[in-house]
Image (cartoon, coloured by chain):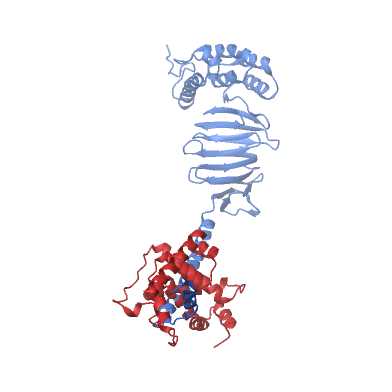
Chain colours: A red, B blue
Amino acid sequence: MAPPDDLVARAQAGDQTAFRDLYRQHVGRVYALCLRLTGNSGDAEERTQDVFVRLWDKLRTFRGESAFSSWLHRLVVNVVLNERRTTGRRERRVALAEDPDSVVGAQHAAPLHQSAGLSIDLERAIAELPEGAREVFVLFDIEGYAHAEIAELVGIAEGTSKAQLFRARQLLREKLAG
Amino acid sequence: MNEDELLRAVGRLPRSIEPPRDLWPGIEPRLQRRRHWYWIPLAVAAVLALVVIARSIQTQPAWDVTMLAGRPLLGNTRLAASGRLRVGDWLQTDDSSRALIAIGHIGQVEVKPGTRLQLVAARRDDHRLALARGGIDATVDAMPRLFFVDTPAGTAIDLGCAYTLETDSLGNGRLHVTRGEVEFETGPRSSRVLLGAIIQTRPAIGPGIPYVEDAPAPLARALVAFDFENGGARAARTILALARAQDAMSLWHLLQRVDPTLRAMVYDRLAALVPPPAGVTRSRAIALDSRALEGYWTKIHNIQFRRIVLRGVREIDPRTGTTRRHE
């Protein structure tokens, strides 16, 4: 496979084969973020596809001022949050007992190790968080965004972001302790 | 679990999770479709732009011109038989050439020899020529105020009529109305020229007082003196002395142009020649009350029309517009 920069340049020029390789390189990261932000594997698949379709349209605006992965990351967040705003969809979490395969963390490709059980529990607990708390938790604690950035991305006050994070952590501790 | 343990667990979460199925088959067709859609609006826009440009070229305002004699010059081209006069184009005739211009769909203009004119506007509500010099015979069959001819001395405004308009190289002009009515306007000054009447025009001054085509020559000269030669009160008195009932149109204009101190005298002469219609009082007319003036004008207008239209058929009393009885 070509170096990432070369792939980006070729995809920018309209090379669909290069774009497919770009998809293969980044789909795991994109899907993981979509899965954690939506809390649902079905929605995550749709959003992942939306992200790459959007990426195809937007790719020519990427000027290399930041790492491609960071730029793509921001695109993922925007696509997921915009979709939630425009459709007004409520969180559609799937009950674990009803559809175990759709549960976040059930399909980890990473090999299981000693802490795998805890990771899966944590993924499930994150998926069950209220929407607002989940988004802030994923963006802050997992993806490393600052509260100011989250406030801008989600369209909330910075203080609300901090409050949602506090709430999310508290809920997770309670769930994982139980 | 405390917060540190939670955050350590978060730190161990995988950064990447492979989706349970290959999502590419759902992405690829959307890329192709979107790429097509990307071009379709552009293609449609390009086609529309071409259509608009083509239509604008086809529908660019232009009037048909037909050569009547000689080789008139249309723009820089000698007119062989016919051509199109577009907005901004000049048409010139020499001493031996004439041309006929179709004024859109509302009339026609015969361009006399030695004329230079330009098509200024060719809109539905504004058919406009500029006559720089020479002469035209215009015939219009349309609602009033659709056809205009700009001259160095002002604008002839068609009120549904036929007329001859001439302008010499100094901008001095003459308008003779042969059907209907024409208004000639220069800034605030305007003259209403009825069927069978004439006005002289001068640049920087505008239209003179109209007079009927059979007006005595001394009366016409007095009007010119009043309008263009600072004739003042003396010329006004001459006009009043020479005026007949047929010249009521001239006195109606004179009333509005003389010094206010002379208005009563003009009104009295006009009223003696053509009695005012009901509702028009002396005081209101002298005060130039618009309703009084319009009422008087309507009567003068009707008499003049009957007089000209029935000329040779019946003898019309120029004081009343009624048929004269012979004892």
Quarter that holds the N terminus of chain B: bottom left
In the rendered image of this protein, does residue A166 appear above or below residue B287?
below
Can residue B155 be seen in this snapshot?
yes
Left or right of residue A8, residue B106 in this image: left
Q: Residue A171 or A82: which is nearer the viewer?
A: A171
Residue B37 percent coordinates (x, y): 46, 70
In the rendered image of this protein, does residue B218 appear above or below residue B198?
above
Instruction: Give the total number of marks visible in the rendering.
Output: 0
Q: Residue B24 or B139: which is nearer the viewer?
A: B24
Left or right of residue A55, residue B236 in this image: right
Can residue B197 be seen in this snapshot?
no
Q: Residue B33 or B151: which is nearer the viewer?
A: B33
Q: In which quarter of the image is residue B231?
A: top right
Residue B222 percent coordinates (x, y): 65, 20
In the rendered image of this protein, does residue B197 appear above or below residue A72?
above
The residue lying at 44 percent from left, 86 percent from top is A114
Residue A134 percent coordinates (x, y): 43, 68
Residue A37 percent coordinates (x, y): 44, 71
Quarter that holds the C terminus of chain B: top left
Left or right of residue A41, residue A144 in this image: right
In the rendered image of this protein, does residue B283 appear above or below residue A42?
above
